[in-house]
Image (cartoon, helix red, strand yellow):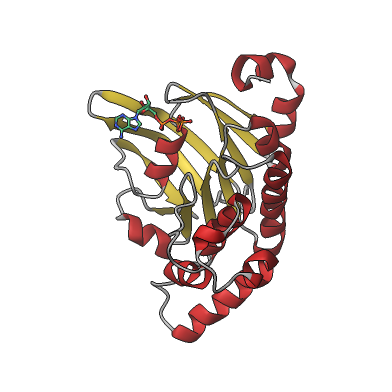
Amino acid sequence: MAERPMLSVEGLTACYGAVTALNGVSMSVPRGGICAVLGANGAGKTTLLRTLSGLKRAESGRVLLDGADITRLPAERHVRHGLAHVPEGGGVIAELTVEENLRLGGLWRAGRRDRARSAAEVLELFPPLRERVSRPAATLSGGERQMLALGRALMARPRVLLLDEPSLGLAPLVTRQIMRMLLDLRAERDLTVVLVEQNARSALSVSDHGLVLNQGEVAMAEDAGRLLADDRMRHAYLGF
Ligand code: ATP
């Protein structure tokens, strides 16, 4: 029997007033899978992540996390179920230190000792953050801020990580570092990742699967290697 997907999305529809931003989107990501979500501006990528994490209400359809229906749960309950969302820009608080930002990510965890252990593990994963733990996030480089955003999400020990444009504003070398970190995280923590990116090439280079959205609908769902190799698809949907 096939293993149950870690994340399963069935016919998801979401609207802003009269605008249908997602229209019957279905996808499935296995445990430990990395799925790139690609598409032009306004295709619905951010809306998909916001609907998956409960920040946006689904008009219809279902989101299943390891088989449990989380579609109608409030956003904070999604975190408890093991789903963490890193929004575009990371959403770290510039005035707070690295350590304080991390602590925010673990706020809902029960014990102080548990939180401290999570923070130590996260700092182990990101040495540049360890060296800057008492500095305000405002003093970090773009790449370090993205690491902090990732680290803060990991404080909740998620099973599924939703990442919105982690490469935005980063130099190519730093983008490659961040993408490689996703592979390490998958290997070390068995994380399942949904990766929204404008930078299709670098996203597909670390993904197993690629989903292309077009005007709120799935235009293509393919093996990442095949998407990268197919000139016609690349020209039509990915712009490179
Ligand atoms: P981008 O790459 O530019 O972030 P995207 O693929 O993430 O684009 P969304 O931001 O999800 O796309 O937008 C999908 C559609 O929903 C677009 O038509 C957009 O104009 C519309 N939309 C998004 N947010 C809102 C909002 N708050 N109010 C009204 N319409 C919105």
Towards the viewer: 117 or 220: 117
* Of 19 and 222, the residue lying toward us: 19
Q: Quadrant of ligand 1?
A: top left
- The residue sitting at the left extreme is 17
Q: Quadrant of the C terminus?
A: top right
x and y, in percent, of residue 121 in the image: 62, 74
Q: Is residue 23 visible?
A: yes
Give the residue displayed 54% in from the left and 74% down from the top: 134
Q: How many labels sit on residues?
A: 0
**Residue displayed at 64% across by 29% down:** 222
| Residue 96 on image: x %, y % | 44, 67
Q: Residue at x 67, y 56 (%)?
A: 186
Is residue 11 shown left or right of residue 127? left
Please determine whether, in this image, residue 157 is positioned above or below residue 62. below
Residue 42 found in image quarter: top left
Q: Residue at x 77, y 24 (%)?
A: 229
Furthest residue in direction right, as rendered: 229
Q: Which sits in the foreground, 154 or 34? A: 154
Q: Residue 66 versus residue 33: which sits nearer the camera? A: 33
Residue 209 in which image quadrant = top right
Residue 233: percent from the left, percent from the top? 66, 18
As drawn, the residue found furthest toward the bottom would be: 113
Residue 157, horizontal then vertical, whole percent:
53, 67
Whether residue 158 appears in this view of the structure is no
